[in-house]
Image (cartoon, rainbow, N blue to C red):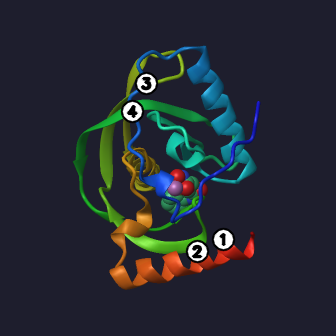
């Protein structure tokens, strides 16, 4: 197992579009394990492979308080969506910043599990928010993209400045 490094906004590598996993095999399962350990270590409720600079369509999530309800989404596709909700989102790639984002309230997805078996999932509320947030990462998008240009510029400046101070 390994804890992987999480890319921080505005790192351009977060803009990479992930490719579908062709065959779910041992290397996929190893990636899932490492991403899971990384997500738990960072106290996140989700993590997309893009965030650890691996550009395959792999997501891990756990919304439970006990951190014992892992969900694995490989090659997820939204097949239905409706409604609207606004949730104050955060992101491990934009540490300590939260802002409201509008997304679908209900979604239905197809995905593969870590055995390569297809399954369907109906989600609403925070689970639906998290799935849409993670699928955005796989498409090279970050939640701050939905904010005003002014806010984006401010966040960018703050994180560039912060990164310099770490050098
Ligand atoms: O840990 C996370 N919390 C969170 C809170 C509100 C909306 C979305 C999220 S996802 C985030 C982890 C993360 O950055 N996943 O990509
Ligand atoms: Ni995120």
Compared across the picture, whether 97 is left or right of 5 comes to: left
Numbered circles on residues, count = 4
Residue at point 61%, 35% (across, down): 70
Q: Which residue is mark 4?
A: 19
Mark-to-mark CA distance, 3 and 2: 32 Å
Q: Which mark is residue 160?
A: 2
Q: Nearer the N terminus, badge 3 or badge 1?
A: 3
Q: Are marks 3 and 4 in contact (CB under 8 Å)?
A: yes
In terms of depth relative to the viewer, which is nearer, 123 or 35? 35
Give the quadrant of residue 111: top left
Pinpoint residue 10: horizontal percent, then vertical percent.
51, 65
CB of mark 2 near ligand 2 (< 8 Å): no
Q: Is residue 67 above or below residue 110?
A: below
> For mark 1, what is the residue?
163
Determine the CA span between mark 4 and mark 2: 28 Å
Coordinates of residue 34 in the picture (x, y in percent) = 68, 34
Q: Position of residue 31 (x, y in %)?
A: 62, 29
Return the disc, 3 or 2, that comes first in the chain's sequence: 3
Q: At 44% from the left edge and 34% from the top edge, which residue is drawn?
A: 57
Q: Secondary structure at mark 1?
A: helix
Query: In the image, residue 1 lies at what x, y percent?
Result: 77, 30
Q: Is residue 146 left or right of residue 51?
A: left
Q: CA distance from mark 1 to mark 4?
A: 29 Å
Q: In what quadrant does ligand 1 lie?
A: bottom right
Label number found at residue 21: 3
């Amino acid at each position: 197992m390994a804890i992987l490094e999480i890319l921080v906004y505005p790192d351009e590598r977060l803009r990479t579009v992930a490719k579908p996993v062709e065959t779910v095999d041992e290397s996929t399962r190893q990636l899932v394990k490492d991403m899971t350990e990384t997500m738990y270590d960072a106290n996140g409720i989700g993590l997309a492979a893009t965030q650890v600079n691996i550009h395959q369509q792999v997501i891990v999530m756990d919304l439970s308080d006990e951190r014992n309800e892992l969900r694995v989404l490989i090659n997820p596709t939204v097949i239905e969506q409706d409604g609207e909700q606004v949730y104050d989102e955060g992101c491990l790639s934009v540490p300590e910043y939260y802002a409201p984002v509008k997304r679908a309230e209900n979604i239905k997805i197809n995905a593969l599990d870590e055995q390569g078996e297809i399954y369907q999932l109906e989600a609403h509320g925070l689970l639906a928010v998290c799935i849409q947030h993670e699928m955005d990462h796989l498409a090279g998008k970050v939640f701050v993209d939905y904010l005003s240009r002014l806010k984006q510029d401010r966040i960018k400046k703050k994180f560039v400045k912060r990164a310099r101070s770490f050098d």
